[in-house]
Amino acid sequence: MNTSAMQLTLLTLAEPNRFKIVELLKQRPRSVGEIVQALGISQPHVSRHLRILGEAGLVKARSKAQQRIYSLEAAPFKELDEWFDSFSILWEERLDNFEDYMLDYKKKEDL
């Protein structure tokens, strides 16, 4: 797991408008104009956010006539998913320990 790439991903997504753009692109690829309309922010701001998302490897663009269509890149999100999943193992272990404790406690009360 590339920690510096994951940190860049998290820092990039921490900005609210970039997060909203990713949420829109999660539904389907979109043009800059569609993103501007959906978010209600200016085209230069959307373009700047898309540039930053692209530099972080989160989105890619393709040309379609006079438009640039943006879509998500899967790899960084898969890496984040694996990282978040590593925490579920930690919590499962803690919850199993808590369950064992509660069962022991209940047995002692029943005596």
Image: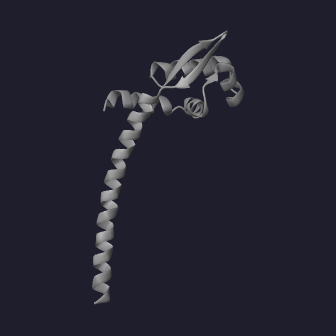
**What residue occupies the far bottom of the structure in this picture?**
111
Quadrant location, the N terminus: top left
Looking at the picture, the colour scheme in use is one colour
Q: Residue furthest top?
A: 66
Image quarter in which the C terminus is found: bottom left
Which residue appears at 29% of the width and 83% of the height? 107
- Residue 69's image quarter? top right
Q: What residue lies at 58% left-to-right and 30% top-to-bottom?
A: 25
* Left or right: 55 in relation to 96: right
Q: Residue 6 vs residue 111: left or right?
A: right
How many numbered discs sit on the rendered protein? 0
Q: Depth check: 86 or 16 in front?
A: 86
In the rendered image, the vertical position of residue 21 relative to residue 96, given as above or below: above
Q: Is residue 28 above or below residue 105?
A: above
- At 44% across and 33% down in the image, what residue appears? 77
**Residue 48 rendering spot, x and y as whole percentages:** 57, 18
Looking at the picture, tell me which residue is in the foreground, 99 or 14.
99
What residue is rendered at 58% in x and 21% in y?
A: 70
Residue 9 appears in which quarter of the rendering?
top left
- Is 11 positioned to the left or the right of 97 in the image? right
| Res 81 quadrant in image | top left
Is 9 on the left-hand or right-hand side of 22?
A: left
Q: Estimate the x, y position of residue 34 in percent, counting from the top left.
A: 69, 24
